[in-house]
Image (cartoon, grey):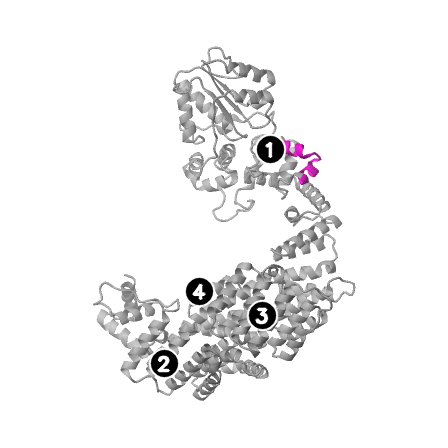
Amino acid sequence: MPSPHVDSPERPTALRTSTRDDPLLDEPTRELCAAVADGVLAPARLAVVAPGGHGKTAVLRHLARRCESRGLAVAWYGQQELDGAQLVLVDDAHRLDDAALTELCDRTADEVTGLVIAARPWPRPAALNTLLSRLRGQVVLRPLDVRRIAAILGRERADLAELVRAETLGVPGFVVRLAAALTSGHGAPASGTAEPGADLTGLPVALFAEFRPDLDRLSPQTLSLLLAATSGAGLDVDLLAGLLDTDHNGVARTVDAARACGLLAHDGTPLPFVARAVRLLVPEERRLAVSQRLVRIQLDRRGPVLDLVRPLLGSELSGAELAEAFEAAADEAAENDPPLAATLYAAATRAGREATALGGRWAEAAARAGKLDDALRLADAVIASPEADGRADAARTAATAFVHKGQLDRAQDLYRWSDTRLSRLHAALVSVQQGKLADAESLLEAPGNGEPPTLVTAATAALVRGAIESVTTGPAAALSTLSDAAETLDPVGRSLFLPDTPAAVGALVGMQCGELPLAEALLDHAVKADGGGRTARTRHLLLSAWISMLRGDTETASRTLTSVGGELSARDWLFSVGLRAGIARRSSDLSALRDIWADVREAVLRLRVDLFTILPFAELAVAAARVGERERLAHHLQRARSLLATLGDPPLWSSTLHWNGLHAAVTADRRDEAAEHARALSRFADHSDYHQALADAAACWIDALGGAVDAERVESAARALHTAGLCWDAARLAGQAAIRTTDRSAMVTLLESARALQTGATTNTPQPASRPDSSVLSERERQVAELVVSGLTYRQVGDRLFISAKTVEHHVARMRQRLGATSRAELLAELRTLVTT
């Protein structure tokens, strides 16, 4: 590290390289040196002005070598006699006194002898300014690029060039010293992982030890500035003035000194390598003392403290002042970073702050971070403390956590106890979920007890109205109201913990009335806006995956499902399981479906049905039928039917239960039950085009089960499903009808229709690939072969291609005979070769 003292010598040996083509110098600099040596620039009058460590000495040495190789007499000012010199080189001109600088000014009048002067940009006495103004040009020193850094590192260490560039920003002095350390026994950082005793970049801690003397030579002001910069102070002049006990001019001088030494980047932040050295080598008590003083100054100024408090996390410090700082930082972080806020609130309590004084805010931060059990524990402590502030808010947070955990009765108790306007609106939404419309409407219209009409309460009221309209009015009015609610919530949604969002409820409504584009738009916007913290984001992503699944795009659905992670609330877990089962069903993966069911068969019994969970329970009903365990969900499905009956059997919500009930009955070969669901769907046909499509498709299913297939009617019904966004259902209807018809012409027509309809969805079904040698496999055989070698059973292949398992078996037998395979393993090897060429 170059010394920051203006009177400290540069380290000329640090920038010396052994190669003739010095990698420290770029091509323009080498060309300029050649021009001086060749007499093209005679006499030379050049300045080399750059911070310490940027290669000024390296330029002068390179220039001296070039000139001496041409027979020119070169002299170093202050080190050699200048008489007879044809070129005078001056290093560290910023360290010269006025007399020396005046002497050099006089030499600029000499039109025979060349003069090249190197100096730091600070300090800049008047005499040095005068001297530099009499020169004719300046050498610009640029940071080293990765190619030149790799050349310095050598072939064995060239792969570290990117890391060295990131740590040093290409400052030559730091590059050379770091390269020397890496190639002289300190060892390289581990690839991709940090070794024991290594910092976050993988650089060995021991590598920094040799820089301790450099830090020891720093002036107290400069070291304090670096400590402040690495503690989050940035270049806040007022803050630094308080720390350094100086005025703005004093701060500017200290910053200029640090910059002149090459310790700071252009934006005032320390070079990463410098920052790491400071953090590793300066005693912890010194660093913490600076951080504490910065925090105190900022608290007194009522300024933001979050960046200043971060370095104090994990320390053993405590006390009222530090607790105050952690609390203030947590309040700052709460909106944008709930997990960090929760960590800071915890640190405040360890520093001495009373937990119940933070409990409400801490609980909400934990809840938005997805830590519902922590939120309930913290909120409960506040609720139970008669002297605690914010008990009503804590009760609302706990109630909302119970909604996410699927415990709606407990949530209602807490919402009613909280008894704020927002709590009553949340209770109204839960009442809709429970099928208690009268209660919901009463709570919605309850007076606000003088509370201001905020954006949050306005948006939540609109959310409740939209949910009620989805039951009483219809999808158009509900979606309009819910879209307005989502827009109203946008400006304030990031800082909220909600039982549900307008986007989520709007998506549920849109998915059950064929408005998938609108549902998708609501969710996409909500994810980008990031309202409601992790809990809301997870819900939005799960519902987005559900839309993809309905369209038959199982790849996107699986990818989105994977992105939410595994730490889920009970409600989100239910949707996640429903998605996994739905994807397995649509992929004809019975093995995966059985594995999923084995994982959830007991857990799902502990969950309760409400209006907003009908979707996953309906999907699981089909899965249960597929694995032969329909009785496992019989109680849940009966509760769902009772709930819907209480609400007057609203078409928008009831149709989903009957549509999936139809498929569960078909799967279980319960034709009478399937017919009941079809009749129920027919009663909803006039509600919307979507419901008409479901009714027509259900009727076609019943006919197909009886062997009566009207190809034209099936095609029409399938196209209507496809238009509504149910691409996979559309293709399946056409394909299954084709299998069940005895009319060869109708079968061909319906199979072609099924394939055409399936193209509306991007599924994980391998698509047929053309083959130059069509004489080996027919088009159909190639389709079968691709699926067989991917590991699917004959039945799964048949489901994909809308043919029977027996037909798949016949195709495989013919291919085996034609290829002369004597075993199944040999056949699979042959087919794998054919379908991958």
Q: CA distance from mark 3 to mark 2?
A: 39 Å
- Tell me the distance, in whole angstroms, between the alpha carbons under discs 1 and 4: 52 Å
In the picture of the structure, the residue carrying the numbered disc 3 is 570
Q: What separation in Å lies between label 2 and label 4 (alpha carbons)?
A: 28 Å
Find out whether residue 84 is within the magenta segment.
no
Nearer to us of marks 1 and 2 is: 2
Magenta stretch bounds: 238-256
Q: Amino acid at mark 1?
A: Ala
Residues at badges 3 and 1 in contact (C-beta under 8 Å)?
no
Magenta portion: prevailing SS class: helix
Placement of 313 over or under 753, stated as above or below: above
Q: Earlier in the sequence, mark 1 or mark 4?
A: 1
- Work out how far the residue at label 1 is from the one at label 2, CA to CA, in angstroms: 79 Å
Q: Nearer the viewer, residue 478 or 359?
A: 478
Q: Is residue 462 left or right of residue 707?
A: right
At label 3, which amino acid type do we have?
Ala
Q: Which dot marks residue 258?
A: 1
Q: Residue at x 40, y 73 (%)?
A: 722
- Look at the picture and state if 157 lies above or below 514: above
Q: Secondary structure at mark 1?
A: helix
Which residue is pictured at 71% across the width and 35% down the height?
245
Residue where numbered disc 4 is placed = 556
* Callout 2 amino acid: Val
Q: Residues within 10 Å of mark 3 (few under 14, many from 20)?
A: some
